[in-house]
Image (tube, grey):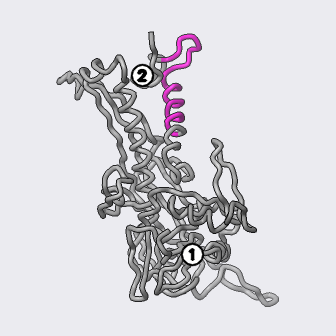
Amino acid sequence: MRTDAFLQIRTALDTTTSTTGGDQRTNIGAVFIQKEIDRMIKETINRDVDFRPLVQRKTMNQKARIWNLRTSLGATAKTSFQSEGGTGTPQPSEFMQLFAPALTLRSDYEVTGLAQAAASSYFDAMDSEARDALSAYALTEEQAFILGNDSDNETSGITINGKIGVSGSYLGLKQLLSSAVAEATGTQGGFGDSTARYGITPSSTVTDEEYKMNVRTINTSNTTQNPLSIQNLNSAITQSNIQGGKRANRIYLCSEERLDEISDLIQPHGRYVQGASSVELDGGLSVLTWKNIKIISSRLQAFNGVTSSGAGVTFTDTDNSMLLLNMDVIFFWNVAGVDVRHVPITGADASQRSDVFGGYYKTYGVFTVESFNTHVVIWNLSTP
């Protein structure tokens, strides 16, 4: 008799005790099996996406992530040289408190009894639907991480929902990595965007603590789109270093087409230029690196554009930017460990006894970027 591993998993999960559905030979109960299945789910879905696996996932036991962003700006300093016998007032640290509420993400699947029975000789409908729901979950979460709640339509067919972002989601990199500093050519400009993030409105004035909400920006020109250059890649690293990101775990994030452009840029004619190499990640995946910083591509980064013709910045749905990210300050916080939790269902409810089988995967949590100045946006790039 053919056995199906996925249906065995559902049997193990569909229990309310620590022994029912477990392995009687080893006395390992279903509670422990559930934790193992949760781990397997997380490892499996990472094959479908690129950026999501690199985001640290942590647990909180509250409905919102609340944290302090340390500031050191203003007229006084925490440390100073003192004259002999001199006295002074210790300066306390200054903070801004930021917050981001958790949301529920759910991916459902359902199969009727007739469909399951009629296809059983050649096709496992339950297995197919469950795997499709898991794949859709992973892609939707990556979409939310990068593009947030952008409600614009997209026509390329890359996303599942036909939108740039995901309606009702948390803010993504497209909304969070901005700057209130006025636009300018080179490394000194910003986007002139004072939209509040996590309850704080950024400031373009360096003496204000809200200045810490600004990311660094790089471009060749703020009036004309230009191709990506090695100078852009180097300048991004330098600006991140200056802000204290030199020892951080950093990645470049770009689109698939931009990765092709970078490949031609740093290994023309199949040979690496100085500073370029490749590195192997867990699972055997090899990626390009520039000065030991991994270059990661995601199909969804193609919708994260920032352009200007000198008359103000436009946030676009086109491939006109790439990012240098400090992954040490980017997290996904789940609530009480509910993270891609599988819930099996038989029937609509106990009273209706509907002839359907299915379930859903659920996550309670929020994506956060908890510090800003060590990230860099390379923008006003020509479309690759």
Task: Tell me the residue at 41%/34% (across/down).
Answer: 131
Quadrant housing residue 149:
bottom left
Identify residue for label 2: 7
Amino acid type of the residue tagged 2 in the rendering: Leu
Element type where label 2 sits in the image: helix
Where residue 188 sits: x, y (%)?
A: 56, 85
Element type where label 1 sits in the image: strand
Q: In this view, does 243 lie above or below 81?
A: above
Where residue 40 sits: x, y (%)?
A: 53, 33
Span colored in magenta: 22-42
Q: Is residue 239 above or below residue 366?
A: below
Q: Are marks 1 and 2 in contact (CB under 8 Å)?
A: no
Give yes or no for residue 26 being in the magenta stretch: yes
User: In this view of the protein, can residue 122 be seen by the observer?
Assistant: yes
Amino acid type of the residue tagged 1 in the rendering: Thr
Residue at the extreme bottom: 83
Query: Does label 1 or label 2 sit earlier along the sequence?
Result: 2
Residue at the extreme right: 84
Identify residue for label 1: 71
Q: Is the magenta stretch mostly helix, strand or loop?
A: helix
Task: Tell me the residue at 17%/24% (across/down).
Answer: 352
Task: Tell me the residue at 39%/74% (across/down).
Answer: 315
Name the quadrant of the N terminus: top left
Where residue 7 sits: x, y (%)?
A: 42, 22
The mark tally for this picture is 2
User: In this view of the protein, can residue 240 be seen by the observer?
Assistant: no
Pick the front one: 76 or 247: 247
